[in-house]
Amino acid sequence: MPIEMTELRHVALRLMPGEDLRGGIEAAFEAAGARSGFVAAAVGSLTNAALRYASLDGASEVAGPLEILSLSGTLSPDGPHLHLSVAGPNGVMRGGHLLRGSPVRTTAELVLALSDTTRFARETDPVTGWKELVFPDRP
């Protein structure tokens, strides 16, 4: 059953050169004090990217310079679930789970959509073995 998010507010931020993309998103979400959220928009560039590919445990480093092509994901007090796609100077695209260790090259402009009423949480799912999104306040 889907959950309806109402009463969204938006937080816009710009990360500066050297700031960690994932760390900056986590810090902005925590500072906002929201119960849930998602990435509404993201553009910018990275020096390199730390990604976790599907079914792998460790990080893979994608050498830069890189342009952010897309960034999507959910935000909860238990941590984010973020997917990033980037392209290098030759236009080859790579993507995966965004991990810490992805420093901004020139800028990262982000808009986060946040809710103070709907709560997201992440709990280990016995079927997948991963921490998955749950809605603890759902009737």
Image (tube, rainbow, N blue to C red):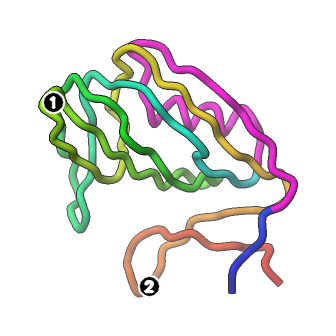
Answer few, some or many: residues within 10 Å of disc 1's Cα (few below 14, many 20 plus, some between 14 and 19): few
Q: In the image, what residue occupies the spot 35% across and 52% down? A: 97
Task: Work out whether 7 lies above or below 104.
Answer: below
Q: Which residue is mark 2?
A: 126
Q: Which quarter of the image is occupied by the C terminus?
A: bottom right
Q: Please indicate whether residue 115 sits to the left or right of residue 61 in the image.
A: right
Give, as a single range, the part of the protein colored magenta. Answer: 6-34
What label sits on residue 124 in the rendered view?
A: none
Residue at coordinates 15% horizontally, 41% vertically from top-left? 92
Q: Amino acid at mark 1?
A: Ala
> Element at badge 1?
strand
Mark 2 and mark 1 in contact (Cβ < 8 Å)?
no
User: Which residue is identified by label 1?
Assistant: 63
Residue 11 image-quadrant placement: top right
Where residue 93 sits, quadrant-wise, is top left
Q: Residue at x 55, y 35 (%)?
A: 25
Residue 14 position, x and y percent, is 57, 20
Q: Is residue 120 magenta?
A: no
For the N terminus, the quadrant is bottom right
Q: x%, y% of residue 95? A: 27, 50
